[in-house]
Each structure stands twice: as structure tokens, then as C-alpha cells.
Image (spheres, rainbow, N blue to C red):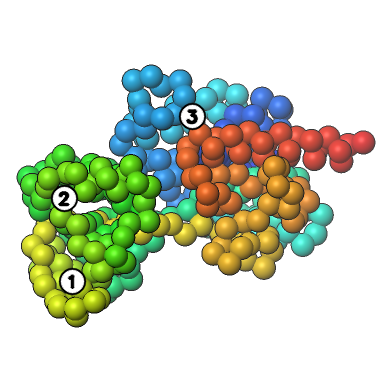
Amino acid sequence: MDTIEKVKCLIIGSGPAGYTAAIYAARAEMKPVLYQGMQPGGQLTTTNEVENFPGYPQGITGPEMMMELEAQAKRFEADIRFGFINKVDFSGSVHKCWTEDGKEIHAETVIISTGASAKYLGLPSEQKYLLSGGGVSACAVCDGFFYRGHETVIVGAGDSACEEAHYLSKLCTKVTMLVRKDDFRASKIMADRVKNTPNIEILFNTDTVEVLGDDLVTGAKVKNSVTSEERIIPCTGFFVAIGHKPNTDIFKGIIDLDETGYIKYAQPGTSLTNVPGVFVAGDAADKRYRQAITAAGTGCMAALDAERYLASLEH
């Protein structure tokens, strides 16, 4: 019994990149199969308000937008599947991929749109409350609602940390922002926004020692890296906004990655990887822009590049 499924186009991962690739590939009669991955809809499902995606003058929530993109892909008969790919072999002319339950798929073309995931500090106490849902989060916009009227702490120094701190300031009585160095990495406009928000206190040169609590978070022990002074900041929510890691581990040694794990483009201005017939879209390769609209744009590019690749095989 032949249990191997043969497909023209396999898309690994959802989000704006994966779904846009599916829309274009489906309209080109490539009959794409898309596996949604560990986080169906990608990072945008953790974004409350998307105000900068063209075509939504009133804005839209991230989850709604992903549902609309998925519905649009399905309209053109893209095969959207729950589950993920956890192993690949691109050594031969056939691109072999395996799902988490062991199903083998042979794809003529593969579009990688696995995105990126939030980074954490790696403290045992942080992981404990993250896993228990007791007060640690990497998404203020998703979870800030639970801390209305409370005091919260947020770690980070970039634009997204400033954005999340500002968002929390509208819900929480006080937000303490912990910045490891003596200044922000964020753009001036974002840094100024948090500096000018009365209920945000910024502590520079400050590291987190431990997240404190019993069943739920009650505070954070922090240390000033210049004076070595330790103090406890009362809080019920501890938010981490220190960047992202590309979800590309399964491609190590197969696809060319940079030193931080982002997929390298074989030719700048295309979606081509070092493996013929394998293309990349979205945040798995983009460490510069990381926007929904740029991810969608590269999803389109990957589908068009895959279509051209298939056409070249036929001639």
C-alpha cells in the first residue's frame, strides 16, 4: 500500500506569508497543500489590532485577518491542514517531508513560511509561570486584558517592547519597563512615547533575577547592573518582549541559514533558497521588516517563483 502523498506544492506554515502563497498557488492550479504549523495563523493571531495593513481603513484584529486569509485560500481550493511538518529531506530531486504523525509527502515544490517565535529570558521561574499560565506572557496585546487595574512589568528595549508597554499603560495602573542597557534600541518616536507616558516607569541597566509568586506571579526581583542593588517590584503580570527566533531548526544543514537561524535567499530579490524547488516567505527569512504586509508580499513572490520552477521542469 502506497502511503506516500504526492503534491505539486507544499506550504509549510501559515500566517500572512503561507496563506498568501496558498492563494496565488491555488489560483495557478498548483493545488497547494498547506500545513498550518504549531501556531495556526502565525504571530498575527496574538495581535489584537492591525491598523497598518492596506485595505482595512478601520483596522482589523489579527485573528480575524488570518481567518479571512484562510477563507480566501480555501475559496480557490487550497488544501489547508491542521498539523505540522517536523522532518524534511531535500537531498534528491524529490522534496520529502514528514508530518508529526509520520505521514510522508513528496512535493515538487516547497514553500517555507514557518515564521518566528518569541524569545524568553530562560529563567526557571519565568518558564514555570509561562507554562502554568500564572502571569508570564510574551504578548501584552493578547494577555493585557487580564491585568486591567493591576501593576505589570515588561522586559525589552526595542520598538515592540515600547509598543507593548504603551498598550499595557492603557489597561494597568502602573507599568515598569526593564531595559538591560542604558538606553533603548527602539526608534526615537517609540522611546519618546513611553518616556512621556505618566504611568510607565523605566529602569535602565536592569536585569531580571527571578519572577516571584506562589500559584500566580506577585512580583519580580531585579538587579541594577551598575550598582548591583537588588529590589523587588510588585506585579501580577510579567511580559517579555526581547525579540524572536526563526522557526527553522528542521532545515539546519539542508537550507542555508545565517548565524541566527534566518533562511538566506539564494538570490536577493527572489524567494529562492539554495535548494532548487524550495522557496521561503515571511519571517523565517525576514529579520529586517517583519511586517504582515511584507510577509504577504514574499508569500506572493514564493508562489510565483514556484510556478515558474514547475513550468521550467515541463519544458
Q: Is residue 288 toward the left or the right of residue 234 in the image?
A: right
Three-letter amino acid code of the residue under disc 2: Ile
**Which residue is label 2 attached to?**
200
Q: Name the secondary structure under disc 3.
A: helix
**Residue 253: image location, x then y, percent:** 67, 68
Residue tagged 3: 69
Instruction: Say which amino acid is labelled 3.
Output: Leu
Camera-side mark, 3 or 2: 2
Nearest to N terminus: mark 3 or mark 2: 3
- The answer to which quarter of the image holds residue 148 is top left
| Mark carried by residue 312 | none
Q: Earlier in the sequence, mark 1 or mark 2?
A: 2
Q: Which residue is mark 1?
A: 222
Residue 52: quarter of image: top left
What whole-number distance in Å separates the C-alpha atoms at marks 3 and 2?
36 Å
Residue 11 appears anywhere in the view: yes
Q: Are marks 3 and 1 in contact (CB under 8 Å)?
A: no
Residue at point 15% right, 72% down?
221
Q: Nearer the viewer, residue 64 or 32?
A: 64
Q: Quadrant of the C terminus?
A: top right
Instruction: Pick whichever of labels 3 and 1 is earlier in the sequence.
Output: 3
**Circle 2 SS class:** strand
Amino acid carrying mark 1 in the image: Val
Q: Residue furthest bottom?
A: 228
Q: Residue at x 63, y 33 (%)?
A: 300
Compared with 55, 204 (above or below) is below
